[in-house]
């Protein structure tokens, strides 16, 4: 049994909150875990956004399990959440599961460079609010016979695949960051930055990151919007 010791109760609570948000969008979600040294990275992919969400957690002591110095396993997000003990600031790693295809394609660990053009936190939040309002208004105007899943997805795809200014970052990445609790706290996104490495773009905040492979309009991942 592998037990990870987090730095404190707050770190455990934040990890549990992230897992709960992932499960809100997919009750059968899986997460890929990577731990090395005093850092744990949790990767998940909420289907409503078609992005990769990354939450890191600080460990109280370096990860080590016999001769294995690095943990790399895909597990059930639900089982992992159940194993979080906030008071003890520990989490037991559940048994591995067969990972979904996305778990085999993660962003690179290094080579990231800062990209210009990311709006400020207030503008990011306003962008998401405008997108949600437009989606509701446009779908609300549809006649009953056109209110199909395919049509709702088409409207959502059009709205959330727009780019954030000239950055190439799809607005759905910002929407995902807000929905998963990464654009919270004073300023609602203060400290956010945009980075690129190869085909990847990464929206990074103090609370977590959202990564997309392929810039919007240039071979981005397929998008399915469910509300």
Image (tube, rainbow, N blue to C red):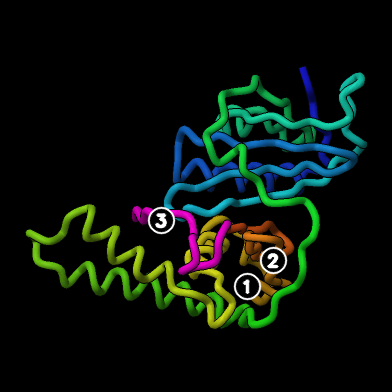
**Farthest-out residue, top:** 1
- Region rendered in magenta: 213-227
**In this image, 65 relative to 188: left or right?**
right
Q: Is residue 226 magenta?
A: yes
**Relative depth, front residue between 71 and 216:** 216
Q: CA distance from mark 3 to mark 1?
A: 26 Å
Residue 188 got which mark? 1
Residue at image mark 2? 196
**Relative depth, front residue between 184 and 197:** 197
**Compared with residue 23, is residue 206 higher up or lower down, i.e. above or below?**
below
Residue 223 got which mark? 3
Closer to the observer: label 3 or label 1? 3
Q: In terms of sequence position, does the residue under pointer 1 or pointer 2 come before the other?
A: 1
Q: CA distance from mark 1 to mark 2?
A: 22 Å
| Main secondary structure found in the magenta portion | loop
Closer to the observer: label 1 or label 2? 2
């Amino acid at each position: 049994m592998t037990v990870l010791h987090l730095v404190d109760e707050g770190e455990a609570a934040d990890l549990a909150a992230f897992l709960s948000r992932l499960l809100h969008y997919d009750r059968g979600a899986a997460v890929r875990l990577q731990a090395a040294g005093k850092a744990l990275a949790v990767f998940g992919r909420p289907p409503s956004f078609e992005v990769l969400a990354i939450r890191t957690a600080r460990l109280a002591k370096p990860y080590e399990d016999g001769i294995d110095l690095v943990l790399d396993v895909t597990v059930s997000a639900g089982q992992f959440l159940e194993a979080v003990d906030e008071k003890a600031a520990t989490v037991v790693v559940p048994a591995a599961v067969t990972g979904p295809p996305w778990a085999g394609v993660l962003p690179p660990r290094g080579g990231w460079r800062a990209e210009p053009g990311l709006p400020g936190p207030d503008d990011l939040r306003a962008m998401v609010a405008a997108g949600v309002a437009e989606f509701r208004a446009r779908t609300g105007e549809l006649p009953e016979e056109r209110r199909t899943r395919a049509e709702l997805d088409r409207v959502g795809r059009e709205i959330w695949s727009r780019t954030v200014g000239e950055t190439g970052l799809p607005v759905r990445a910002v929407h995902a960051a807000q929905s998963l609790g990464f654009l919270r706290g004073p300023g609602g996104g203060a400290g956010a930055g945009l980075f690129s490495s190869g085909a990847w773009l990464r929206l990074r905040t103090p609370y977590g990151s959202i990564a997309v492979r392929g810039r919007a309009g240039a071979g981005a991942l397929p998008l399915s919007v469910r509300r």
